Image: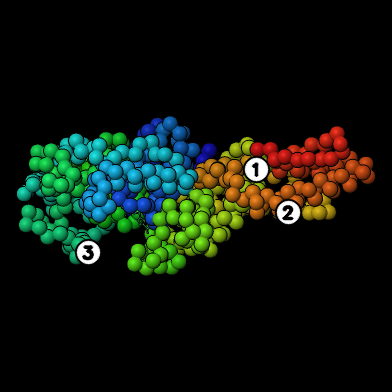
Amino acid sequence: MSPPLKLYNTLTRTKDIFAPLDPKNLRMYVCGPTVYDYAHIGNARPIIVFDVLYRLLRHIYGEKHVRYVRNITDVDDKINARAAEQGISIRELTEKTNEVFQADVKALGCLEPTVQPRATEHIAEMIAIITRLIESGHAYAADGHVLFDVPSMKDYGRLSRRSLDEMLAGARVDVAPYKRGDMDFVLWKPSKENEPGWDSPWGRGRPGWHIECSAMSWKHLGETFDIHGGGIDLVFPHHENEIAQSRCAFHTGVMANVWMHNGFLQVEGEKMSKSLGNFVTIHELLHTEKFGGRKWPGEVLRLAMLRTHYRQPIDWTVKALEEAEKTLIRWQKYVVRNEVVVVHEPFLESLADDLNTSDAIAEMHKLTSVGVIAGFSMSGHAKFATPEAIMESAGRLRFCLQILGLESIADRAWNVTTVGNEVSAKIEAHITARNAARSAKNWAESDRIRDELLAMGVALKDNKDGTTTWEVRR
Ligand code: AMP
Ligand code: ZN
C-alpha cells in the first residue's frame, strides 16, 4: 500500500493529506502556454513537475481515474502583435508555435494530458460564465467591456493573502474610464476590425486571459476539481482572478481544493531575460549548441529539472546538466539488466511527501549502489551483490524511472559510443576470465561468471568454433 500523498496547498499554506473529491475521477488543471513564441526552459518547469504528479496520481489511483487538463492559450494580445510583426495570420502563428511546443514537451518525456483544450474553442463557455457573473451582480458591462467587480467578492485575495490595498499598490493596474473600481479586471473586451473577435451580448470582442482558464476547467473538469497548478508568478493576479470568476459564477466555496505552484528557474545564478542574453528555449537546448556548446537529450533536461524540489528556486547550469547526464548513463547501464518492474516503496514515500523528487532521486542512487557494471574487476573477484539482488534493484530502478518519466533511457542510444565501449571492454574482460576458468576446468567459476553477466542482462553464447560472443538482452 502506498503511503498517503501529501501536497502543499498555496491556498492554506499547509502540507495536507490529499483527499480527492472522487477517487474514481481525479481532476487536475494546469495553466498551459500562450502560443506566440517558443517555450523557454522556465516554462518547462511546470510542464515537467505536473507531468510527474500526473504519473504519480495515475500510479496511486489508476490510469483511467485521473483527468489532466492543460490548456493552450491561443487568443491573446501578444499573439496578435507577434503575428502582425511576422506578417502571418494568427492561426498560422498559433499552429506553428503549438507544434513546436508539443514536440518540445514530448522530447522532455511528458505524457499527453487527457485534454489540451484551446481557448478559441471555448468562447461559448466564457460567454456563459460572464453572463452568470453579470446576472449575479459580480460583473458589469461598460463601453463594450465587461469587468469583474472585485469588491463584490468578500474574500477576494484569499489565495495570494493580500488585502485590496496591498494588491492595488503591488499590481500594475490599468486605469480606465469604464472601470468602477481600480482592481476590477477585464472579462471581455471589444475587438477592432483587424483584431480577432467573436459576437457576444456585449458586441464583437474577445476574452480576457483569466476567463479562459475558468471556462476550460469548467468544461473539462466541472465547477470544482482537485488540483490546480502553475508557476508561482501565476498566484496573483491570474489564479486569484480565476478563483473569483469560477466561485462567483458557480456559487462554490472553492474552485480547486489544492493549489500548487512551482518555484522560479534562473540561469547560472541570474534571472533569465532576453536582455541579459541568457534566455534559452527548450527547442534550443534540444536542437542547438546555444547552451554549454552542445545539444542536450530531453532526459537530461528532465532529470536536471527534477533534482530540485519543485517549490524551491532552481538554478539552471551547464554543470547541473552534465551531472544529470552522468547519472542517467549510470542508471542506464544498471537498468538494462531487468525488464521486470518492481514497486519501490522508499521512492514512493519521498514522492508522496509533496512530490519530493530530490529525495526520490537519492533513493534511486541508493539502488544503483547495489553492484554496478563499473564495478567489474579483471580478477573476477569483484565484490558484487548476488545476481538476484542486482536484478531486484534494477527492477526497482525501472519502476522509479517510469514514475519520473525517464523510462526512455533504457533504450537510449546516446551513450552507445562513450559508455558502450567501456562496458564492452569490461564484458570482454569477464569472458577472458571465464575462458581461463574453463581451461582450468573450473566449471563452477565459469558458470558463476556466466550467471553474473546474465544477471546484468548480458547473455553469452559459446560458439562451435570455440569463441564466445555476447548480446545485451532487454
Ligand atoms: P507564461 O507563458 O509566462 O504564462 O508561463 C507559462 C508557465 O511557465 C506558467 O506556469 C509560469 O508560471 C511558468 N514560468 C514562466 N517563467 C518561469 C520561470 N522562469 N521559472 C519557472 N516557471 C516559469
Ligand atoms: Zn490559467
Q: Which residue is farthest right? A: 440
The residue closer to the viewer here, 276 or 47, is: 276
* Tag 3 secondary structure: helix
Q: Nearer the viewer, residue 240 or 5?
A: 240
Quarter of the rendering occupied by the C terminus: top right
Report x, y in % for residue 314: 44, 61
Element at badge 1? Answer: loop
Q: In the image shown, does 7 or 242 lie closer to the viewer? A: 242
Tell me which amino acid carries mark 2. Answer: Gly
The answer to whether one can see residue 306 in this image is no
- Sequence-first disc among 1 and 3: 3
Say which amino acid is labelled 1. Val
- Asked which quadrant contains residue 280, the reply is bottom left
> Does 275 appear above or below 35?
below
What label does residue 336 carry, if any?
1
Residue visible at 43% across and 64% down? 267
Circle 3 residue: 170
Residue hosting label 2: 375
